[in-house]
């Protein structure tokens, strides 16, 4: 029989995850860890079996049917089998609820996001509506609207599959994606009830039970400040749409199992969430939550790519020995692993801060730190996930280019992390918004000092030094830039944001490495920190704007 290759396999994705398990041992009180390990192990098992099952069947996508046999417009959406299974599974594990429950105090978000991280790659992006539901719950709580809180929260935060609802987030229009000031959807008050008229260009998870939407009250001024935030229940109990037409499902590069629709609102009934203006301010808490989910999803993508490539490296023999024994392959995997570990510690640190903020355990500086880090972590992990997914495909050679291996899907799906919930540039500008609004870099610099003061081991000295030097360079760059033109600082904002994310991530990884050396006698996090530092932290530009203007307008 001729030579055959062996497909990569995944073992239990929790039990097999050194990075997650070591991190949880450090940050969680032992009783909390003991209480949640059953859930994590189950989700880890689900993740590995879902990978095997997905390879064994045809890939499915959602399907939209506009008309029934009798000529009635129905706009029925059929979901994939995995999506149908995901909603009860997500409810029973409390993938949204856990982030809002008080059982584990300030650790609620670490618990929740550890589950989400394990679940994401097996969920066919059902994590998208879960993220939006979590964000909607957070925005509604912040609004103080008692009626809507009592109506929606018991469903959004339910662990009962029969009661659990998911939510959408309807912002994007053809005239306003990044810049929602272009929103054309109009809200009219008719007979004491608000109704929405307009077109939403991207609505993710259109099957959601509820949605939060931005619209402009009729007669209000142009611009974003006069937009208002509305709550909708788009379908009647019998599944008919409430004055909403689903024009089509989007034909996307990735996330193809997620039903993303283009819709028309023709008097869809809606309820005001707060005052009839300042809708962007009201939806901002939702954005910060979904951006955190985005970072977790990006992290899960990285971990999946590395896990598959690592498994394959033990099966695939070339030049007379397994790939796992070939120095250059080892080096490629090590580079991916180091970047992933740094991203992991930054992302989960943000979830720690979020949990503390939510349970009232943060001071103003820590709240400002959370505000600064949220766009940074979304931006950097979004870009990194695509790079690592691409490298992971390459680890399989030609097999990584074949659709039916399931590997290319990882790369196509990864591209979404840097686009939705605000592109990389939107995050960089949001970082500047936070930087200007929260007293500059101080919260970040002083947190970094505290973190690095816990790094003492000789093996980590070069890492701590690199992190301190990078922080100084960024501070100097920002000081120089803020005295110059606003446009100069904007042109360099992406590199500053990525540099800051990498610098802070290295500090966190080094601190964890110090703990792992002492508490677990494990030298691997320290090796990851050294390798990550060697990759370099900064690419600040000295003449960003001038060169950029010349090159951007290049034509023959
Ligand atoms: O992509 C989408 C659906 C996908 C769902 C995927 C979920 C994730 C899945 C994860 C799975 C694991 S929906 C489309 C998402 N669209 C965006 O993200 C929009 C991107 N654009 C921006 O973020 C822009 O920066 C805007 C829209 C926020 C800019 O709006 P404005 O109105 O021009 O900005 P302003 O005037 O600067 O901000 C208005 C107010 C200000 O507060 P006040 O009024 O008090 O001065 C800001 O400080 O909003 C406040 N604000 C914020 N506050 C703005 N952004 C934030 C923020 N991030 N945090 C707190």
Image (spheres, rainbow, N blue to C red):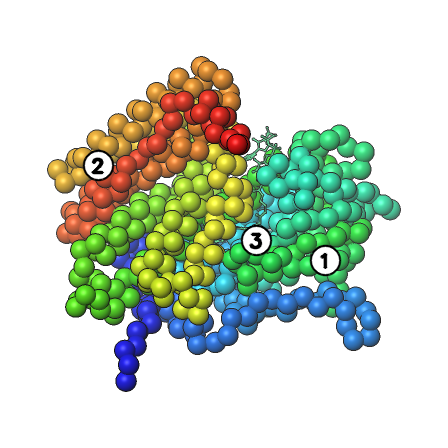
Q: Residue at x 65, y 59 (%)?
A: 249
Secondary structure of the residue carrying numbered label 2: helix
Residue occupied by mark 1: 247
Q: Which corner quadrant of the figure contains ligand 1?
A: top right
- The N terminus - image quarter: bottom left
Closer to viewer: mark 3 or mark 1: 1
Q: Residues within 10 Å of mark 3 (few under 14, many from 20)?
A: many
**Residue that sits furthest to the left in the current view:** 458
Of the numbered discs 3 and 2, the one sitting upstream in the chain is 3
Q: Position of residue 482 (x, y in %)?
A: 45, 18
Q: Is residue 348 visible?
A: no
Inter-mark Cα distance, 3 to 2: 39 Å
Q: Is residue 218 visible?
A: yes
Q: Is 483 located above or below residue 18 in the figure? A: above
Residue occupied by mark 2: 463
Looking at the image, residue 225 sits to the left or right of residue 495; the answer is right
Q: Residue at x 76, y 47 (%)?
A: 198
Q: Position of residue 531 (x, y in %)?
A: 22, 44
Inter-mark Cα distance, 3 to 1: 24 Å
Secondary structure of the residue carrying numbered label 1: strand
Inter-mark Cα distance, 1 to 2: 53 Å
**Residue 221 appears in which quarter of the rendering?**
top right
Residue occupied by mark 3: 133
**Residue that sits furthest to the top in the current view:** 483
Q: Residues within 10 Å of mark 1 (few under 14, many from 20)?
A: some
Q: Position of residue 225 (x, y in %)?
A: 67, 31
């Amino acid at each position: 029989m001729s030579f055959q290759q062996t497909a990569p396999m995944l073992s239990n994705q929790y039990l097999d995850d050194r990075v997650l398990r070591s991190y949880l041992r450090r940050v969680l009180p032992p009783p909390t860890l003991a209480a949640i390990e059953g859930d994590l192990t189950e989700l880890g098992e689900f993740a590995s079996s879902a990978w095997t099952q997905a390879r064994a069947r045809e890939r499915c996508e959602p399907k939209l049917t506009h008309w029934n046999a009798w000529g009635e417009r129905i706009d029925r959406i059929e979901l994939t089998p995995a999506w149908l299974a995901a909603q009860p599974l997500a409810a029973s594990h409390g993938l949204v609820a856990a982030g809002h429950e008080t059982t584990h105090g300030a650790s609620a978000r670490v618990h929740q996001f550890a589950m989400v991280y394990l679940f994401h790659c097996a969920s066919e992006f059902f994590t998208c509506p879960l993220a939006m539901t979590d964000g909607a719950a957070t925005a509604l709580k912040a609004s103080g609207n008692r009626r809507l809180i009592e109506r929606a929260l018991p469903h959004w935060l339910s662990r009962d599959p029969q009661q659990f609802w998911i939510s959408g987030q309807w912002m994007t229009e053809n005239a306003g994606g990044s810049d929602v000031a272009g929103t054309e959807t109009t809200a009219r008050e008719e007979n004491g009830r608000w109704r929405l008229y307009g077109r939403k260009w991207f609505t993710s998870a259109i099957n959601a039970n509820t949605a939060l939407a931005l619209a402009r009250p009729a007669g209000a001024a142009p611009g974003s400040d006069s937009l208002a935030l509305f709550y909708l229940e788009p379908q009647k109990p019998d599944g008919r749409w409430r004055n909403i037409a689903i024009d089509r499902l989007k034909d996307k590069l990735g996330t193809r199992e997620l039903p993303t629709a283009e819709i028309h609102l023709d008097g869809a009934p809606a309820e005001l969430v707060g005052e009839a203006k300042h809708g962007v301010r009201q939806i901002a808490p939702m954005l910060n939550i979904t951006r955190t989910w985005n970072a977790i999803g990006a992290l899960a993508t990285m971990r999946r790519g590395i896990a598959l490539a690592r498994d394959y490296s033990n099966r695939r023999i070339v030049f007379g020995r397994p790939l796992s024994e070939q120095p250059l392959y080892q080096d490629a995997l090590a580079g991916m692993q180091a970047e992933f570990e740094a991203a992991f510690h930054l992302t989960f640190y943000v979830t720690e801060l979020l949990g503390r903020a939510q349970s009232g355990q943060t001071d103003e500086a820590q709240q400002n730190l959370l505000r600064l880090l949220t766009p940074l972590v979304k931006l950097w992990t979004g870009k990194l996930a695509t790079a690592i997914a691409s490298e992971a495909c390459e680890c399989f050679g030609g097999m990584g280019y074949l659709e039916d291996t399931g590997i290319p899907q990882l790369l196509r799906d990864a591209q979404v992390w840097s686009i939705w919930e605000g592109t990389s540039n939107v995050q960089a500008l949001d970082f500047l918004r936070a930087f200007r609004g929260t007293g500059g870099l101080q919260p970040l610099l002083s947190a970094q000092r505290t973190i690095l003061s816990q790094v003492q081991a000789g093996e980590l000295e070069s890492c701590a030094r690199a992190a301190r030097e990078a922080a100084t360079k960024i501070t100097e760059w920002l000081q120089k830039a803020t005295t110059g033109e606003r446009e100069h600082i904007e042109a360099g904002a992406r590199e500053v944001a990525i540099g800051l994310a990498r610098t802070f991530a290295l500090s966190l990884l080094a601190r964890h490495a110090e703990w792992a050396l002492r508490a677990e006698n494990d030298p691997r996090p320290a090796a990851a920190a050294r390798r990550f530092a060697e990759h370099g932290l900064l690419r600040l530009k000295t003449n960003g704007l001038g060169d950029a203007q010349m090159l951007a307008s290049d034509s023959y």
